[in-house]
Image (tube, rainbow, N blue to C red):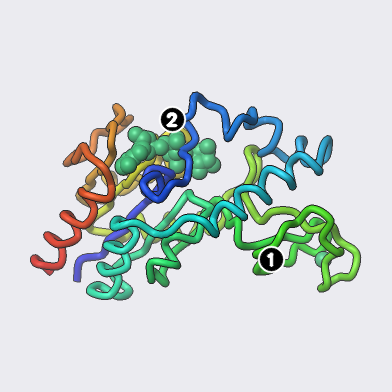
Amino acid sequence: MTRVVALTGAGISAESGVATFRDSGGLWEGHDVHDVATPEAFARDPETVQRFYDARRRHLRTVAPNAAHRALARLEGALGEGLLVVTQNVDDLHERAGSRRVVHMHGELARARCVDCGARIPWARDLRGADPCDRCGHGVLRPDVVWFGEIPYDTERIEQAVVACDLFVSIGTSGAVYPAAGYAALATAFGARTIEINLAPAAADVPFDEVRAGAAGVEVPRWVDEIIAGA
Ligand code: APR
Ligand code: ZN
C-alpha cells in the first residue's frame, strides 16, 4: 500500500480565510512576530500575546474547511493508516473536514498549555483572564502553540513517517521554517517521490519530483482523485 505523508502549511487554509504568514508582508495581523510568538514576548507582555491568540482563536469560529482540507479527509478514508497529515498550522480545519490522522507540529489554537505542569487542555474560549490550570491548581494557561525558539511537537513520529513513506506531498508551505522545511529532502533521501502543491512554488534546497502550481482548493482535490483512482 502506498504510504503518503502530506505536509501542510498556511497556504492550505488561505482559501478558508485564514491569513498566511509571509503573504501579509511579514506582519502577523499587524504584529511583529517577535512581539507575539516567542517565549520572551509572553514573559514580557503576556496580555498582548494572549490577546493576539484569543483573536485568532475567535476568528477560527468564523471560517470553515475548504475543498483541499476535505480532499485530504477523503484520501484518509481511502488510505486509512496509509496517510499521515503533518501540519504546521494551528487551526482545526483538517479535523473539521474529517481528518483524524493529523499531527500538529506547531501546536493548536484549540488547546491551552499550563506553564507549570505542562498539561495540554482542549480550549475554545479566551485565555485572557482565564482561571489557573485546573490540573495543578496554580499554573498560568498559555496558548498551546509552539513559538519561535521552542521545540516542535512529535518530530520523532514525523521523521519516522517521512523516512518510511513512498510519497511526500507538500501543500501550501513556503518552506521557510525548519524542521518542516527539511522533510522533503529527507523523503527524497529515503527514496520517496515528492510533490509540491503551491500557489507560488519557491525554489527548494532539494527539488521536488513534481511541482503543481495553483490554489490548494483546486489542485489538492485533483491530486487526491488521481491517487484514489490509482490506489
Ligand atoms: N494555495 C496553495 N498555496 C498557497 C495559497 C493557496 N491558496 N495561498 C498561499 N499559498 C502558499 C504561498 O505561496 C506560500 O508558499 O502558502 C505558503 C504560505 O507560506 P507561509 O505564510 O510562510 O506559511 P507556512 O509555510 O505555513 O509557514 C511555516 O512559519 O511563521 C511560521 O510557525 C509559522 O507554521 C508557520 C511556519
Ligand atoms: Zn498545571
In this view of the protein, can residue 178 be seen by the observer? no
Name the one closer to the observer, 4 or 162.
4
Q: Quadrant of residue 227?
A: bottom left
Name the image quarter holding residue 81. Answer: bottom left
Q: Residue at x 26, y 45 (%)?
A: 188
- Percent position of residue 48, x then y: 76, 39
Depth check, front residue: 24 or 35: 24
Q: In which quadrant of the rendered view does residue 51 lie?
A: top right
Residue lying at the far left in this picture: please name it: 230
Tell us which disc is closer to us: 1 or 2: 2
C-alpha gap between disc 1 and disc 2? 30 Å
Pointer 1 residue: 120
Q: Residue furthest right?
A: 138
Q: Quadrant of the C terminus?
A: bottom left
Mark nearer the N terminus (1 vs 2): 2
The tag on residue 179 is none
In the image: residue 12, left or right of residue 225: right
Q: Left or right of 189: which side holds 113?
A: right
Q: What SS does tag 1 mark? A: strand
Q: Which numbered circle lies on residue 23?
A: 2
Amino acid type, label 2: Asp
Circles 1 and 2: CB distance less than 8 Å? no
Q: Spot the residue most to the front.
A: 62
Nearer-the-camera pick, 60 or 159: 60
